[in-house]
Amino acid sequence: MPIKTDAIGKEWPGTTYQAGREKIKEYANALGIDNPVHFDVEAARAAGFRDVVAPPMFAVVYSGPALGPVLFDPDVGMNFAAMVHGGQVFEWGEPVCSGDEITTSSKCLSIEEKDGKGFYVFETVSVNQDGAEVVRGTWTNIVRGV
Amino acid sequence: MADSNVGDAVPELRVTPDKYLPHRYAGASGDFNPIHIDDEFAKAVGLPRNILHGLYSMGLVAKANAALAAGDPRALKRLSVQFRGMGMPEQEIVVSGTVKSVDGDRVVVDTVAQQGDTAIIKNAEAEVEL
């Protein structure tokens, strides 16, 4: 059966995430990142940030949840049980600081079948409360045995 | 650091995630997929044990590259990775990289994350502004 490609080009509305100091701290601790700009508001301000700033890969925390409804969308029709995360790209813009409200929208860029595997590529675009882009993510999920 | 040259090595990052790291990362990231935090579940679906989150390993790759700019969170402009072998808790991860190109104050670094002979992240390309 050919792979279902109905969702190519489909867009999903934004989900909003408010960044907070404790969550940024928790993420930095899990990664063993010890720069005080992630923990101490005075250090962050001295370095030119509005508030405690998130490490770049904190992007997964605020943009990842936007993909939840996408992966389970019947138009996508993905066999979630056979899915692995194949690749990831992030391109960063404005830094994310505690207090920022980040809105992430999603789009299906492509669905292709190669060597019996399905390659699903989604894009997320995250903007802050001022409309400035903070990160653009390209998520490639591979489904075995489509 | 603005005098990086093609072929320069990025300072190697060595981390051994402890048994409970996947649980802490699950809490920090919000990804509670049981293959990462439930050893019995992981084995039931054919994995050798509970495995690391790929995005945790990518986070280590980001950290290793940010070190080029003294950990400045503004320095990393782009990071592209492919997830390959599965990462395991309680085994040392070695992240290493080499400067591939230099354009003004922006460098592109080829990076790999390995556990023993297994590349858990490969073809990682980071753009860092120094």
Image (spheres, rainbow, N blue to C red):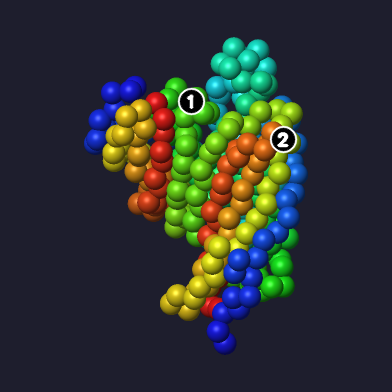
B57 is higher (above) or lower (below) than A139: above
- The chain under label 2 reads A
Residue at 68% from the left image edge and 47% from the top image edge: A104
Residue that protrudes farthest toward the bottom in the picture: A1
Q: In the picture provided, is B18 more to the left or to the right than A18? A: left
- Quadrant housing residue B2: top left
- The chain under label 1 reads B
Q: What amino acid does circle 2 point to? A: Gln
Tell us which disc is closer to us: 1 or 2: 2
Instruction: Please state which of residues B83 and A14 is positioned toward the viewer in this rendering.
Output: A14
Residue at 43% from the left image edge and 77% from the top image edge: A115
- Secondary structure at badge 1 equals loop
* Residue at numbered disc 1: B71
Q: Position of residue B24 (x, y in %)?
A: 66, 40
Q: Residues within 10 Å of mark 1 (few under 14, many from 20)?
A: many
Where's the C terminus of chain A, which quadrant? bottom right
* Residue at numbered disc 2: A129
- Quadrant housing residue A9: bottom right
Q: Position of residue A145 (x, y in %)?
A: 53, 78
Count of numbered labels shown in the rendering: 2
Please say whether residue A121 is visible from this viewpoint.
yes
